[in-house]
Each structure stands twice: as C-alpha cells, then as structure tokens.
Amino acid sequence: MRSLLYSILFYFSLTLVGQELIDVSGVWNGNSNFLKINYQVTAIIQQKGSQLEGYTISKAMNGKDSSKVVFTGVIDGNTVKLYPLRFEYKSGSACMANSILEFSETESQYALIGKWKGDLKLKTCPPAVGGSFKLYKERLPKAIASTEVVSNEPVRTLEPSDDIGNALISELKKRNYYALIIGINNYPDERIQELDNPINDAVSLSNVLVEGYSFEKENVMTLKNPSREDIINSLDELSMKVTDKDNLLIFYAGHGIWNEQLNQGYWLPSNASINSKSNWLSNSTIRDYVGGIRSKHTLLISDACFSGGILKERAVFENSRAILELYKLQSRKAMTSGTLKTVPDKSVFIEYLLKNLKSNTAPLLSADQLFRNFKIAVINNSPNGQVPQYGPISQAGDEGGDFIFLKRE
C-alpha cells in the first residue's frame, strides 16, 4: 500500500513542474468533527517542494478520543492532500483517514478547509466515515514571515533598521497578555506552617508586569490566600477569555508537597488539610488547564517546594533560538524555584526574577533568556543550594516556542 501511495505522490509532483507552489509549512491549529463530536486539531507540516510530511494531534472536546498521526502528502495547485501513515499514539475510537483541503488566505491568516474520509485500505475508518476539517495559521507581517533568522543568540536590542524585530513588536502590541498571580501565606490547618512572603511576592510581580510590560491591569488577576475552588474558578475564567493569539502567565507562591506513593506533586491552597488531598491541587490538574487554555504561549512560574515535578525536562536549554523563531511555535513552559526539594520562605528565586524583570531594557525578552540571566545568581545565593529549573510542561501542547515579554515603551 505504501509503495502505491508514493507512486501517486510522485505522479502529482511531476504534474506540478513549472507551477508556483503555495507554502503550507508550519504549525496549523483548528478543528474537525464527526457526527456531533468536535475535535481540537494541531497539524505540524514540513514541505519539500510539492511533497509534505508531518503529523496531526487530535483531541476530542468530550475528552474521550485523542491521537497523534504521522502523515505524508502532496500539493496539487491550491489543494492539499494528506495521507496517514501510522499512529504515534491513540486512545478511544480515533481513526486514520485521508484529507482533501483547499488553501486560501486573507490579510490576517491562511486557511486549509475541506473534508476527511475513511478508506478501507487504511483499515481504521470505513469509507462511510468522514467529516469536516478546518485548519488555520496566522499570517505574520511580511518582514517576519519571509525572513530566515539564523543567529543562535536572542534579539536583545532593536535598531530602526531591524525590520523583523520591529514588525514583531507591532504584532505583539495587538495581542493580549493575561496573568494569574497566586500568593498564599495563611493556612488554617495548624499542621501547615504559615508563610510570610508569598503575598508580597505576588503583588510585587503583578506590579512589575503591569508597570513594565504589556500586561493591562484588567487582565491581571491577583489571588491572595485563595482556596482550591478560587484557583479553579480563575482558571476556568481564563479558559473562556484567552484566545490562541493571546499570551498567559501563571504564578504560584505558597506551599508545595510531593507524594512519593502517587509520584505526584501538589500545590496547597489556603483551605488544604494535611490529612486529606481533597483540597490539594495536583500537578496533573494544573497541566491539564495549561494544555487546555488555548493561548499562543503560556508560562508557568512556580515558587514552591517540589515545584520542579511538573517539568518534562529539568535542564536549561543551552542553545537559545532567535526571538522570532521562539514566537512562531506554540509553547507551554514552566519556570520553577527548585527541583524535588524544599525551598525557603524568603525566596531568592523571586528576588532575582523581579530584579531581572525590572532591570531589563530589551524590547523583547524570551522567558528562556530571562531564566538564564538569573539562574546562577539563585544557585550562588540560596541557603540550601536550590537549583531553579526551566523547560516544557509534559503533555500540555508545547511545540518548541517560548513566552516573549514585551517591554512597555
């Protein structure tokens, strides 16, 4: 079957000689449906001439089905044809199907819209099974979309001649920056030690973001001593507000705890009891919200004991890519004050985080660069040798991008 498929693709490539090809490479987001079930879909497409390869990640909105499918494909004029090869993973009744999509464009975005349909040769979806397929990719300003950035160093200063950086700044000014800032000092359960600094740290960070960066005051929620319900309600509110063009920062300062039996980390809201997990907030729940809120970039900053447990990787990236390239791809990153160990109430981590945000003069600053600016200072000045961490959040939709701080003018 696969040899026949490649013969078909080769035939299409011959018929396209001399034609100007559309460019469909990159990250596409959208939806698909089957009967009354809607699916959230992300497609990663790599293009070599008229030939395509990549994968799709599909998640049913009812939470029952999900899959990652590797595909090959071909461009025929303005038509994009995708042919599945194999599952990387599958849950529920997900199936592989052929897709025929038409390419179109507006001033703000590109679109691939069409149908998917089963094929007996694929042995997963019968021919009668099918549905609609809609994918979109935002269209960046021409200076951004058409220029390759080859430097491995992040953009730190912008000159009038820096068309790429200035175009990106102009684009980011159109986007909303949201923040959920949580600080917990007080715990009614006498067996949980009260803290002195988290609320002050939370308020200080809120002020820095509003005064120094493109976070409007009405888009910053600051929670002082919230219950588990308060935190969940705030996350639910953000899930309704935040769009796939917006950016989200979540900060937590308070107690954290690690459960060896369940191999799971937790935040302790103000109404937590040491004897019952009913009001604890697990890393898995936080991860689900971070993955489900459809932002362009989400950065989670956690200043709590055992906060490193939410990370997929616990190593700092050694080769930072240019700001533009980091912006293009969706990100779900976490910055934590330590690994799987306790951290002190008086936080060296938040001290140097705030110091670097305040002293930064660059119009554009990636979270990765921010972290590298103060990581060593935290290690050298912490009383217990804490090592802060930065990396992607596991299974939350990270695609290799990064959160970009936009400095206020």
Image: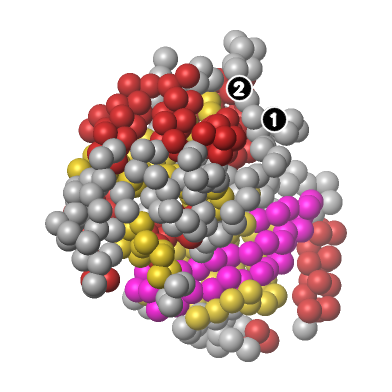
Q: Residue at x 72, y 59 (%)?
A: 52
Disc 1 is placed on an element classified as loop
Amino acid beneath label 1? Glu
Q: Is residue 51 magenta?
A: yes
* CA distance for labels 2 and 1: 9 Å
Q: Nearer the viewer, residue 161 or 158?
A: 158
Q: List x then y, in percent, for residue 272.
A: 22, 62
Which residues are drawn in magenta?
45-74
Q: Main secondary structure of the magenta part?
A: strand
Element type where label 2 sits in the image:
loop
The residue that mark 2 highlights is 156
| Label 2 environment density (alpha carbons within 10 Å; few <14, some 14–19, many ≥20) | some
The residue pinned by badge 1 equals: 153
At 24% across and 72% down in the image, what residue appears?
A: 275
Residue 38 locus on image (x, y percent): 38, 69
Q: Can I make out residue 216 in this image?
A: no
